[in-house]
Amino acid sequence: MIKCLFAGSSAKRAITNPFGCLIYRQLLWVEAQKRQSKIKNVQGNKFKEDPRRNQGDTKRPKDPALGDGESQRAAQSMKAVKPTEKVPVSVGHGGATKTNENVGHWSQGLKASMQDPKLQVYKDDDVVVIKDKYPKARYHWLVLPWQSIPSLKALRKEHCNLLKHMQQVADRLIQQCPDCDSLSFRTGYHAIPSMSHLHLHVISQDFDSPCLKNKKHWNSFTTNYFIESHDVIEMLEKTGEVSVKEGSSELLKLPLSCHLCRNEFPTMPALKEHLKYHFSK
């Protein structure tokens, strides 16, 4: 005979197995309920992981907008991206030396292109001529000064001779073009250029190029958004600066209109098909 520890000190029962005691089992059940309640409270305060994930899986979910191949390329490009570096460029032209310039952003691309021998067509002590990487016509060159001039707004009266020289170089390019007798050309500047560093466009008026894709491209060369080189030089000589009219960017939104006959067209493909009529003669 042994004491039942749960029934009181006065009760004596013959117990060979404590689980045979009803009170013992009830107390065990109460204790189990308390422990379970504590566990639930603790879990409720913790982050609940997505049940669809495998336990211990801490990988970042894939972007649903990217396919498997694209997500891998995106990951690789993220690894490859480094802070923009300053590329040392040193060219002695006319005694002028250019030092480190930031060419990391796409808008700074001209500063790198003007150093590329594969793109260079002509160069002297003051300017370099390169082929436009994305020509908007059969013939499309850019005349750039070696001197660092970001845009038209940075021009001053002392730059007049430089701009006249740029125009003279452009005129020689046109004269030496094998199709100069059958094609007309224009030379000028964009009112609000997308690329940093002053550059003079020398472009044939056929506009026969797969790179000419949209209304913005077209209107940037066929409206007053394109400022004639001679007008820029005249403005600089008279006022000592170049002023760009307010609202020039709105010119890019004008309807598509043929620069030769002024007929309007709803789409670029329709306009380009129409241009064949003019240049098939």
Image (cartoon, rainbow, N blue to C red):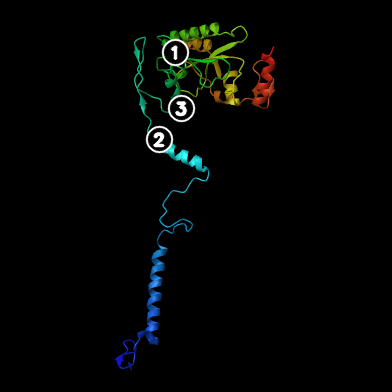
Going by the image, does 21 lie left or right of 195? left
Going by the image, does 42 lie left or right of 191? left
Residue 272 showing in the rendered view: yes
Q: Sequence-wise, which precedes: disc 1 or disc 2?
A: 2
Mark number displayed over residue 80:
2
Q: Quadrant of the N terminus?
A: bottom left
Farthest residue to the front: give it. Answer: 16
Residue 9 showing in the rendered view: no
Q: Is residue 2 above or below residue 73?
A: below
Q: CA distance from mark 3 to mark 2?
A: 17 Å
Mark number displayed over residue 128:
1
Q: CA distance from mark 1 to mark 2?
A: 32 Å
Tell me what residue is drawn at x 40 percent, y 35 percent. Answer: 80
Residue 176 picture location, percent across and down: 54, 6
Q: Nearer the viewer, residue 278 or 152?
A: 278
Kind of element beneath mark 2: helix
Residue 86 picture location, percent across and down: 36, 26
Kind of element beneath mark 1: strand
Q: Sequence-wise, which precedes: disc 3 or disc 2?
A: 2
> In front: mark 1 or mark 2?
2
Tell me what residue is drawn at x 49 percent, y 7 percent. Answer: 168
Q: Nearer the viewer, residue 78 or 270?
A: 78
Residue 124 picture location, percent across and down: 42, 9
Kind of element beneath mark 3: helix
Q: Nearer the viewer, residue 103 or 190?
A: 103
Specify few, some or many for label 3: CA neighbours under 10 Å numbering under 14, 14-19, or 20 or more.
Answer: few
Mark number displayed over residue 106:
3
Q: Amino acid at mark 3?
A: Trp
Residue 261 picture location, percent across and down: 68, 16
Q: CA distance from mark 1 to mark 3?
A: 20 Å
Q: Sequence-wise, which precedes: disc 1 or disc 3?
A: 3
